[in-house]
């Protein structure tokens, strides 16, 4: 029990260290997103309120993506520099170490983003929140966590911060546009191909629902894609934990 | 995790408050284009047709602290197809009204509109106000004078005003009234476009300011609690603020004790 208590204390101390190390980015997110949201709500004219969320997310998700990439970069840097060895020489398990960074790169940005998103509306007019579909928020979280986990796993396995940055930019910014082009290239005259619709909704469940509402006949496909994304997220988390337990070696 | 939530709440509250205050201080007006709008026509008498061109009721967001102003910048395109007797052909008139004057009120009441047409036809602005206020819909404010355009015998009159339906809530509508002579037809729908710009002026209410402060205070409390829990030193600005609060509390207690003993 004593040893377990020591381990938990060590984990709490380490978490505090990790959260502090990404704190300035967290604050950056909390500065930028509410500022943009408030300005946009203030300057939005009533008829376009229905599309407010699309508008806000399309602008502010950039800050969120940047934060997740930076956090994963910090994690990979920690691994590549060998800072982790200092902490892992303390009673901190490898799994605890990975979980802490996983929280810092996935849950912390998602929480910070969600709060930065919701608080301006709570302040300005709570009724505005009612115009948003709660499912949208869930999909936003799901998308954020699954993409963050891909970047995190890249950092965990490769231990190369540069690769993390490249994968992060690719997943968050380039792939999104590539799929959007593929989506629209078949969209103009005919419904987009089922495969493109599925892949799009699998990787970007939120964006595919809000920014590019699919064709009605693809509602089923989208539902399956969202479930597949959930499964993928769980698989990625499990893979990271198993990797930490079995393979992860500190050199 | 608590400190993350605390820091975000504290920062967000302050940012929202600052942004709202800045927008209010600068008296910034945010404008956007709106339109096209609904178009109605009424045949009033004989060979003169009175065309009520635009009927707009802004979807007013009744959020506290927001006020909407409708600032018409009206343009009409392909407004009328008129028969031109000189060249014996159908002529499409492109009519443009810039910063036309319109009156604003809740125009869903057709019974209100019809007497208005007579008022407009006589171009009596006072009459318009009288009709509006008689109907007691709300306090009507009309501003400006009419714009007058005369092309191929077509006359347009438009007005601008505002109507405060309830405190802080404005309804807006734009109306153009035109007289069309017998040589003209008015296909109207589909061929007429009216555009305006809707402007919003922000003025944060006390409730909003209070909510911002409350959220920030909650965030700081969470932050302090988490730091204390972890046994970490508080940031300097929080220590200073807490010290100031303590000193203020101490002084207030001292004053109270002095008053009670005297």
Image: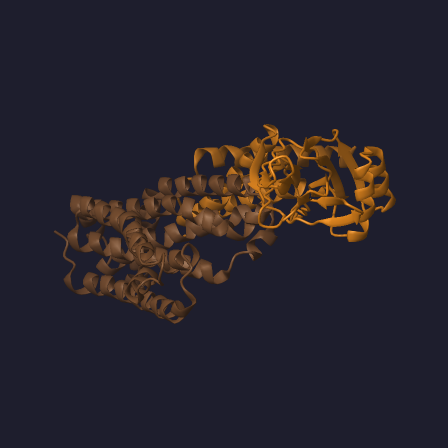
Chain colours: A brown, B orange
Q: Can residue B25 be seen in this view?
A: yes
Q: Is residue B42 above or below residue A141?
A: above
Q: In terms of image quadrants, where is residue A60?
A: top left
User: As drawn, which residue projects farthest toward the left?
Assistant: A251
Image quadrant containing the N terminus of chain A? bottom left
Horizontal placement of A106 versus B240: left or right?
A: left
Task: Give the number of marks.
Answer: 0
Residue at the location (69% across, 50% down)?
B40
Q: Is residue A156 left or right of residue A100?
A: left
- Which of the 4 image quarters holds residue A100? bottom left
Q: Which of B183 and B177 is in front in this view?
A: B183
Instruction: Report whether residue B166 is seen.
Output: no
Percent of width and height locating residue B169: 71, 44
- In the displayed structure, A151 sits above or below A237; it is above
Say whether residue B110 is left or right of residue A92. Answer: right
Q: Nearer the viewer, residue A165 or A199?
A: A199
Left or right: where B107 falls relative to A241: right
Q: Position of residue A205 (x, y in %)?
A: 37, 60
Q: Nearer the viewer, residue A212 or B177?
A: B177
How far across and how far down the image is residue A214, in percent? 40, 62
Q: Which residue is drawn at 15% across and 62% down?
A: A247
Q: Position of residue B151 (x, y in %)?
A: 66, 33
Looking at this view, is A116 or A206 the one in front?
A206
Q: Which residue is drawn at 59% across and 28% down?
A: B26
Q: In this view, does A231 lie above or below B15?
A: below
């Amino acid at each position: 029990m004593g040893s377990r208590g020591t381990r938990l204390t060590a984990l709490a101390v380490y978490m505090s260290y990790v959260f502090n190390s990404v704190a300035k980015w967290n604050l950056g997110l909390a500065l930028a997103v509410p500022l943009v949201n408030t300005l946009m709500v203030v300057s939005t004219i009533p008829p376009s309120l229905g599309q407010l969320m699309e508008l806000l997310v399309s602008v502010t998700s950039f800050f969120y993506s940047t934060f997740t990439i930076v956090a994963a970069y910090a994690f990979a840097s920690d691994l590549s520099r060998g800072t982790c060895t200092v902490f892992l020489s303390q009673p901190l398990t490898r799994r605890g170490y990975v979980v802490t960074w996983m929280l810092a790169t996935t849950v912390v940005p998602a929480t910070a983003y969600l709060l930065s998103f919701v608080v301006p509306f709570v302040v300005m007019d709570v009724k505005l929140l009612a115009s948003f579909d709660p499912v949208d928020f869930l999909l936003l979280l799901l998308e954020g966590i699954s993409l963050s986990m891909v970047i995190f796993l890249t950092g965990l396995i490769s231990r190369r911060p540069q690769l993390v940055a490249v994968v992060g930019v690719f997943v968050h910014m380039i792939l999104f546009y590539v799929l959007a082009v593929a989506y629209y290239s078949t969209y103009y005259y005919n419904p987009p191909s089922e495969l493109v619709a599925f892949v799009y909704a699998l990787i970007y469940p939120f964006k595919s629902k809000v920014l590019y509402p699919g064709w009605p006949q693809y509602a089923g496909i989208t539902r399956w894609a969202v479930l597949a994304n959930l499964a993928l997220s769980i698989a990625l988390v499990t893979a990271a934990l198993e990797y930490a337990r079995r393979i992860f070696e500190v050199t | 995790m608590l400190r993350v939530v605390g820091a975000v709440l504290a920062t967000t509250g302050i940012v929202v408050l600052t942004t709202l205050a800045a927008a209010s201080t600068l008296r910034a007006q945010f404008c956007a284009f709106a339109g096209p709008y609904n178009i109605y026509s009424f045949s009033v008498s004989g060979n003169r047709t009175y065309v009520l061109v635009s009927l707009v009721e802004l979807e007013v967001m009744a959020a506290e602290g927001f006020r909407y102003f409708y600032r018409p910048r009206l343009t009409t395109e392909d407004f009328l197809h008129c028969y031109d007797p000189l060249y014996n052909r159908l002529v499409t008139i492109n009519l443009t009204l810039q910063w036309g004057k319109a009156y604003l009120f809740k125009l869903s009441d057709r019974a209100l509109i019809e007497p208005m047409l007579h008022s407009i036809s006589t171009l009596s602005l006072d009459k318009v106000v009288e009709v509006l206020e008689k109907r007691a819909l709300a306090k009507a404010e009309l501003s400006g004078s009419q714009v007058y355009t005369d092309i191929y015998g077509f006359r347009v009159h438009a007005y601008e005003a505002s109507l405060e339906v309830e405190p802080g809530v404005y309804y807006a509508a734009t109306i153009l009234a035109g007289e069309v002579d017998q040589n003209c037809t008015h296909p109207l729908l589909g061929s007429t476009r009216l555009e305006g710009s809707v402007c919003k002026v922000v003025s944060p209410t006390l409730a909003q300011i209070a909510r911002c402060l409350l959220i920030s205070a909650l965030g700081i409390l969470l932050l302090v609690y988490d730091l204390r829990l972890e046994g970490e030193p508080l940031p300097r600005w929080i220590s200073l603020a807490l010290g100031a609060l303590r000193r203020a509390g101490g002084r207030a207690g001292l004053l109270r004790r002095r008053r009670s003993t005297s």
